[in-house]
Image (cartoon, grey):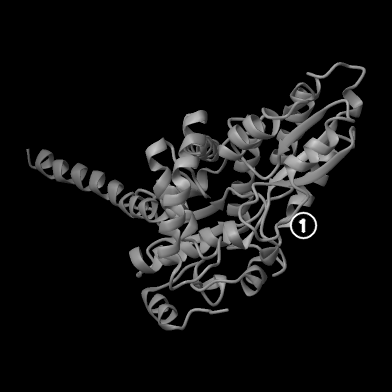
Amino acid sequence: MSLLRTSIPTVRLFSTSNALFQKSPTGVVFMNMGGPSTVPETRDFLYQLFSDNDLIPISKKYQPMIAKYIAKFRTPKIEKQYKEIGGSPIRKWSEFQAKRVCEILDDTCPESAPHKPYVAFRYARPLTGETYEQMLKDGVRKAIAFSQYPQFSYSTTGSSINELWRQIKKLDPERTVSWSVIDRWPTNKGLVKAFAGNIQKKLQEFPEDVRKDVVLLFSAHSLPMDVINTGDAYPAEVGATVYSVMQELKFCNPYRLVWQSQVGPKPWLGAQTADVTEWLAPSQKGLILIPIAFTSDHIETLYELDLEVIGESEYKDKIKRCESLNGNETFIQGLADLVKDHLKHGELYSKQLPLDFDLGKSNDTFEHPSQVFGEHSKKDSQSSTSKNVKHK
């Protein structure tokens, strides 16, 4: 009897001990601009977007007021576009991709398992702060900020990192989560092979006698020239992706890199996708538009390319769009391999990132990426937040 009495609490203590020593999950956070999943979310999405001084540098003091006016003015037009495509699918695909990556990592990287997927959007829900709060509730202690912009720009990846820093200071001043970042991956093998495979499939839709002459137009979101002229890495890295894809294809077809989505009167990086398509369409045997800087479908592919550039062209029968990456398993495996290598090598951020932030213009950022990424004690956190932020 005495043996039985002492064995019962021993079992309970052992069980409690196991619970105490369970590993916290490794957070894999897919960071992107996002998009309104439903049409009524459009106005708030536009307000968040035009409020971002890293993306659209207007005025730190007056930008929220200006953003409110622009969002109100542009909402009816953009709502109409989202109605035509049924809302943005970017959240659906981001959540799917993140989940699949974590499933692969649980099998291939047991030492850092379990891996928990998160999505953190810059301008739509789930916003970065909402995701961070959920991570804290889930007991995450180590997290990878995984930019879903393959090619770095201060206006996109840089903006997401700046927002992460603001949320760290607001929600996690004691630095309970240790962060690292994958800030660029323009020549990732899975990315390159997935694009090449999709292009090959699309070429098969053209008659065999013209297939080798079809022009490949790689289309990326443009940027204002005043951003490019700061030394932003984006054009070079998009070019690196295009060249890598063409190498994979053994330069089978003529190709060009063009740029889409110009907004406003400022000079933007060109030539513009719509203009080049219309110039070439009459004289070429066929054109394929390839959204090379996007990892899933959203308004720039489903509306701008499909319904405007192709749909409104009198040569639409000669123009096709390459499928977006979406649920492509080759692509997703490439993402998982990228995270695996990141975990293996223990790199907090790329060697390029400090220079990106030296060149990038912002009214609200940090002195150096080391303030954001790596292990930080409460004391370190307090001293770093007391420093003046960098102003340029």
Q: Which residue is located at x 71 percent, y 34 percent?
A: 194
Q: State which quarter of the image contains the N terminus.
A: top left
**Where's residue 305, x and y in %?**
66, 35
| Count of all numbered marks drawn on residues in the image | 1
323 lies left or right of 242: left
* Quadrant in which the C terminus is drawn: bottom right
Q: Which residue is more in the foreground, 360 or 316?
A: 316
Residue ID at (86%, 16%): 207
Q: Which residue is mark 1?
A: 236
Q: Looking at the rendering, which quadrant does residue 155 occupy?
A: bottom right
Of 24 and 69, nearer the camera is 69
Query: Is residue 194 visible to the viewer in this orientation of the structure?
Result: yes
**Which residue is outermost to the left?**
1
Q: Position of residue 373 (x, y in %)?
A: 51, 66
Q: Residue at x 71, y 50 (%)?
A: 186
- Asked if 86 appears above or below 149 in the picture, the reply is above
Q: Position of residue 21 (x, y in %)?
A: 33, 51
- Viewer-side residue, 320 vs 130: 320
**Along the viewing direction, whichever of 84 and 246 lies nearer the viewer:** 84
Residue 168 spot, x, y in % from top left: 40, 65
Pointer 1 local density, CA inside 10 Å: few below 14, some 14–19, many at least 20: few
Residue under the image location 82 percent in, 19 percent down? 206
- Please state which amino acid type lies under the numbered disc 1: Ala
Is residue 104 shown left or right of residue 87? right
Which image quadrant for residue 36?
A: top left
In the image, is residue 55 above or below residue 174?
Answer: above
For numbered disc 1, what is the local secondary structure? helix
Q: Is residue 49 left or right of residue 223?
A: left
Does residue 142 show up? Answer: no
